[in-house]
Image (cartoon, rainbow, N blue to C red):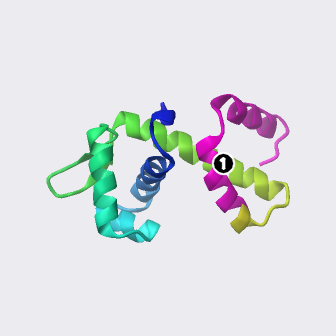
């Protein structure tokens, strides 16, 4: 499913998920502040995600993940957290691990990620 979205769209969905866990509501301005982007850039991205039915925007401008958006966001977030934790466990500095995990989470195949996940949990490495 995620291979039809680009890395940027996946990052937006992941950011909406993370913000929704921290804030009572998520707005475009919150996403722009979190990512350091212009509000106009975020508005274009939200339009695209809305057209792909990964988000809904209510009349107050609050952004909500749809079931498909939530599925993608959860997948990317799981990849990010596991990969960054694993890299830190391997001795990579936390900031480097987080940056590398952010790149890896978008390009790794499902098969490779599942194999890493099995290995990590079987060996209790995170």
- The residue located at (69%, 57%) in the rendering is 100
Camera-side residue of 82 and 107: 107
Across and down, in percent, residue 98 comes to 66, 60
Left or right placement of residue 120 versus residue 72 in this view? right
Which picture quadrant has residue 40?
Answer: bottom left
How packed mark 1 is, by other alpha carbons closer than 10 Å (few <14, some 14-19, many 20 or more), is some
Q: Which residue is mark 1?
A: 104
Q: In the figure, 104 relative to 60: above or below?
A: above
- Which structural element holds mark 1? helix
- The residue located at (58%, 45%) in the rendering is 106
Left or right placement of residue 6 versus residue 68 in this view? right
- The residue located at (72%, 53%) in the rendering is 85
Residue numbers of the magenta segment: 97-126
* Number of numbered markers: 1
* Magenta-drawn stretch contains 104: yes
Left or right placement of residue 5 versus residue 75 in this view? left
Dominant secondary structure (helix, strand or loop) of the stretch shown in magenta: helix
**Taking the image as drawn, is residue 2 in sight?**
yes
- The residue located at (76%, 37%) in the rendering is 116
Q: Furthest-left residue in view?
A: 59
Which picture quadrant has residue 30?
Answer: bottom left
Left or right placement of residue 104 versus residue 126 in this view? left
**Taking the image as drawn, is residue 25 in sight?**
no
Across and down, in percent, residue 87 comes to 77, 54
Across and down, in percent, residue 107 comes to 62, 42
């Amino acid at each position: 499913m995620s291979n039809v979205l680009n890395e940027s769209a996946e990052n937006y969905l992941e950011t909406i998920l993370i913000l929704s866990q921290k804030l009572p509501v998520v707005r475009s301005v919150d996403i722009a502040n979190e990512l350091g982007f212009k509000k106009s850039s975020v508005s274009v991205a939200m339009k695209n995600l809305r057209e792909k039915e990964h988000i809904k925007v209510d009349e107050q401008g609050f952004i909500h993940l749809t079931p498909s958006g939530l599925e993608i966001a959860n997948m990317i977030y799981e990849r990010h957290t596991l990969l960054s934790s694993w890299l830190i466990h391997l001795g990579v500095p936390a900031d480097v691990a987080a940056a590398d995990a952010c790149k890896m989470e978008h390009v790794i195949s499902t098969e490779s990620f599942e194999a890493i996940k099995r290995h990590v949990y079987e060996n209790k490495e995170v």
